[in-house]
Amino acid sequence: MKYKKPLLVTTLVAGVLLLIAVAASLAISPVVERKAEQMLNRYATRARGIEHFTFSRVEFSPLSRSLTLHDVLIVYRSPKGLRKSVDRLEISVPIRAAACAVPALRPYLMPEKGSMDICNAITADGVSFSMPGLLAGSLEHAVISGIAADAGHIRALMAGRRPDPIDILERAQLDGLDALKLRATVQTVNGSAACNLEAFRLRGLHDLSIDEMRLERLKASTNKESAELALFGMDGFRAPDAATLRLLLSVRLTGQKTEQEIASSIEHVLPMIQQWLTASVPPVRVLAMEKASFRGARPQDIMSLALIRLDWLSNRPREMKTAVRDLVLPVQLIESNGLHLPGLKELRFNGESDTRDENGRIRETGYLSLAQFGQMRYNASYAVPGGVFNFSPMQLLSMNIHDAAFTFVDQGALAYIALNQHDPDMAGPYFNQALDYGLPGAENAALRAALKAFADRPGTIDIVKTTNEPTPLLRCFDTGTLGRLWRASATPGKESLYEQMRRLAPAQ
């Protein structure tokens, strides 16, 4: 019983404090709303690029520390005539950031160094934008959350100074960005182009890197062409460091430049790109594209893709995986380059590869499949000068091949190649003569015999390097050493080359 009175007093005091807080909130809200209106109007009159800025009302919630603007309209001077409107714009800020808006409190609350949270979330509903005769679009909903910036940059901006944009980006942080139902139409010389994006998601922007990004259900179309994409995803993206990024952005490859100047610029940029690609942390961990299609002006110009994916797991040690599923290309794309493929309407490609370090060498395995042409599986190891792969053509040419094995299953490739050169009666003799000429001598006899057997009845051919000793890449194709370096065995197919050619092109 002796605790009942203090408990009652405590409850009454808490209730009074709550009533005071509510009353203070109700009292302070009109003051904040009035000050916000004044600041926004003052900013609009001073901003050089804004011609007109209005909103119907402002609401402030002390409990959530959020400021909401309704029926916002902005008309820009440059680009001329650009209009933006937002049905509802809500900005929520942390207590500390809100207090730093008061100059007298700023020295005590803003840190000297490091980052500072400046905004909990910015939410926009019912966004529309337009430019007369050029652009029109809308965005149903967007949220930017967890915005932080460098304290020094905030001070500089408040003092009217503009820090370097790359420095700002390097030290800025963003927890997430979500956008729903983006629609846009652009007028062009040849008509109009439309773009629809159902959803966009970004997570973890920090230190010039992005943890995750997703584009979902993208559609784009013109008067003659259209494209669709179910998903584009990117995980673990890391841009070049600030110094490199600044140099890359300073190099211009367009404008009034001679071919020599452009070549010099490219020569200057390539080492920086190679350094970025070969850094200990890969530039991107995962890239993926799912269910993409493109339709051209003609009915036959249709391309589609079920999946393309890159998993770039590590550079040191090197580990990378790639995959392509059902890449469909119109046969006209190939035939326009002079290759005739009778009876084919489309080309369907599949493939995958796995690349990893193995005892100081790079081991690569995988397969490539082109429907109605053939399928190749491979397994090889090689070493590059310096031990680190740097995407240099010269490095590729100077690599050493250790072990290698290839298996090719013919499904029409040799017959299609022969059809573009010879009639069925002459194809066999031609291949025999070409092999006699290209692989002369007794040391190449076994290799030559296996290739002739494969050419006579295309089926399966296995080619294996006979030694694991390092061999320069160019020497692997030296006709004088092919028979000693490579061993081949052929398994005949069901049809001869002549029969295949007659079946594919009966009238020839």
Image (spheres, grey):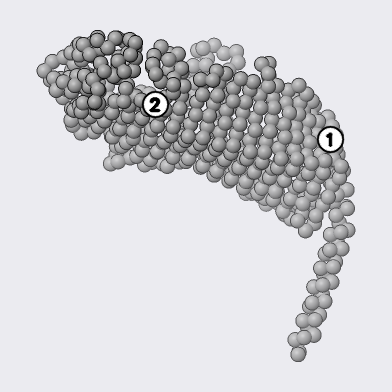
Let me know if residue 468 appears in the view: yes
- Residue at 34%, 14% (x, y): give it: 505
- Judge whether 288 appears above or below 80 on screen: below
Q: Amino acid at mark 1?
A: Phe
Under circle 1, the secondary element is strand
Q: Amino acid at mark 2?
A: Ser
Residue 62 percent across, percent down from the top left: 80, 56
- Residue at 75%, 32% (x, y): give it: 129
Q: Which residue is mark 1?
A: 53
Q: Is residue 146 left or right of residue 354?
A: right
- Judge whether 487 appears above or below 99 on screen: above
User: Which quarter of the image is occupied by the N terminus?
Assistant: bottom right
Q: CA distance from mark 2 to mark 1?
A: 53 Å
Let me know if residue 276 appears in the view: no
Q: How many marks?
A: 2
Give the class, few, some or many, for how many residues have Cα within 10 Å of label 1's Cα (few <14, many ≥20): some
Q: Is residue 223 left or right of residue 438?
A: right
Q: Which residue is mark 2?
A: 392
Q: Is residue 165 left or right of residue 237?
A: right
Q: Which mark is residue 218?
A: none
- Residue at 32%, 29% (x, y): give it: 375
Residue 31 percent across, percent down from the top left: 88, 52
Residue 486 percent across, percent down from the top left: 19, 26
Q: Nearer the viewer, residue 463 or 207?
A: 463
- Residue at 49%, 16% (x, y): give it: 263
Under circle 2, the secondary element is loop
